[in-house]
Image (cartoon, rainbow, N blue to C red):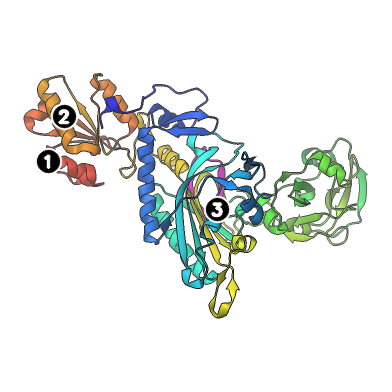
Amino acid sequence: MRYSRLFTRTMRHTPREVQAPSHQLLLRGGYIRQIGHGLFGYLPLGQRVVQNIKRLIRAEMERLEGNEISVPLVNPREIWESSGRIELVGRDLVQFSDAAGRGLVLAPTHEEAVVEMVRSSLTSYRDLPLFVYQFQQKYRDERRARHGLLRLHEFLMKDGYSFHRNFSDLNNFFPRVFAAYERIFRACGLNVVPVEAGVGFMGGERAYEFHVASPIGDDVIIRCEGCGYTANREVAVGHKPSYGGTPRPMETVDTPGCDSMQKLSRYLDLPRHSLAKSMMFRTARHLVMAVVRADFQVSVEKLRQASGEAILGMARPADLRSAGLVPGYFSPIGLEQELIVVVDDAVANTPNLVFGANEPERHHININFGRDYEACRVADISRITRRHSCQHCGGELHEQSTVELGNIFRLGTFYSERMGLEIQEEHSKRVYPYMGSYGIGIDRLLAAVVEQYHDRRGIAWPFELAPYPGYLISLGRSLRVREFTEMLHRELGDLVLYDDRGDSISSKMKDAELLGIPYILVVSPDSIASGMVEVIERSGGGSKKIPPAQLEEILTSKDGFRNAV
């Protein structure tokens, strides 16, 4: 490809608000352009990197005997109603109607659409197992769209879906996908960390996520350096400090102006672990009260698991008042309406706590679980942090900011039951197939690679992902040099991006380094005289004089340059 015919343009500077290195370099290198808030388009160089990522993923999916399909971004609203997820996703789901008034959604995931696609083909246990996958756009009305490709409104994913006769078959397939994902990320040059995760609005029984460390990541994982335990912060477990004591008589005291835990702790001169914090959350149909000690935060994912309800967000003051509660002072004591109340196990096990009295500027002290109040469920619903110790070995826990690149979900019969997908087993028995769901964010993966592989000069692509293996430059304007360079371009073809512009050699070298193509091929009068081409390795900076006949071998093999004599 000739640079003069390539639809791209490099930039020397990026807007001040562009902070992430990947965002800066992909813009400057002419890989992407912003179309709107959280909306980006790929220029030809970026598209070639995307195709290389797809190629790596597709090879692994074929090893799993996957069938490539495609379902539309726009889904009928009715299939999301049938799965029940229309109420679970919340404001992230964009809904609209067509000219005939039919309800439609922009799908953030495609479980429902895939179930509808396979419905007419999956009729018997003989049709299973089945594994299908696709590369498709998704849309999520993301409130935190930022950092270029790392968090988008519209994004490209590889998603796979497996259907199985029983749980055992799904359980046996799951580790095969797990291993395939590790190979994919390793081929992209990334050191990912698999972690336990929550299922969120995806539904199902168990999930794992694949994270890569990043100082600008939106996720946080908890790791134990002692035993290696690793989990997403929202589901991580740990040892919670316990505090004993003999139950004392309950009292009600005035607490003027104490509408926060900080103010209450200061006014009563008590540590935060002596205070109980009640928080109210909204679901599609109910209010759920979560109670944790004030030295903890509520984990929304743990609360979802404990309550069995999809948490949509915090309750509004109007919601509290309609339930007969006083904002800032409510608790599970003396409720006027029946509510779902989930109490953290550390609260239930700590005596003589302070609770809101559900009266303005008043609190109850010396509150004990079982004697003064009850709960629908006692469970671990608090968020573990680095202040706590490992529940498994007692070791020190560490927090790490990360970017999630992929996930795998053991969905069970969550979708098949709700959507009425049945297969006929032996002896005419009809059962619901078990499902798995497996996703990789292509845009985010691409950005994560740039976050890891760059320097002050630009991107330094891993060989497997680079838009071209070689960047061809001629030094000097002599006819002989130009003709020799043209000959190399014809012979090497799509293996090189040929910079045929009339710019200076320094300008061409700066662009070559910015674009991050693995090998820079320099043709000069001296190299022609010696019958060699100088090949400069972008990542390591080393160079070698290579005979033209060996260039193709170097540009088609990851270790070609290293092995060249």
Q: CA distance from mark 1 to mark 3?
A: 51 Å
User: Can I make out residue 498 in this image?
Assistant: yes
**CA neighbours of label 1 inside 10 A, class few (<14), some (14 to 19), many (20+):** few
Can you tell which of label 2 and label 3 is closer to the viewer?
Answer: 3
Residue at left offset 75%, top offset 47%: 282
Count the labels in the image: 3
- Identity of the residue furthest to the front in this view: 100
SS type, badge 3: helix
**CA neighbours of label 3 inside 10 A, class few (<14), some (14 to 19), many (20+):** many
SS type, badge 1: helix
Q: Is residue 304 above or below residue 511?
A: below
Question: Circle 2 sits on which residue?
Answer: 486
Q: Quadrant of residue 504?
A: top left
Q: Is residue 226 above or below residue 521?
A: below
**CA neighbours of label 2 inside 10 A, class few (<14), some (14 to 19), many (20+):** some
Give the mark nearest the N terminus, 2 or 3. Answer: 3
Give the amino acid type for the residue marked by disc 2 in the picture.
Answer: Glu
Give the mark nearest the N terminus, 1 or 2. Answer: 2
**Do labels 1 and 3 touch, CB within 8 Å?**
no
Magenta stretch, overall SS: strand
Q: CA distance from mark 2 to mark 3?
A: 50 Å
The span shown in magenta is 208-226
Question: Circle 1 sits on which residue?
Answer: 549
User: Observer-nearest residue: 485 or 524?
Assistant: 485
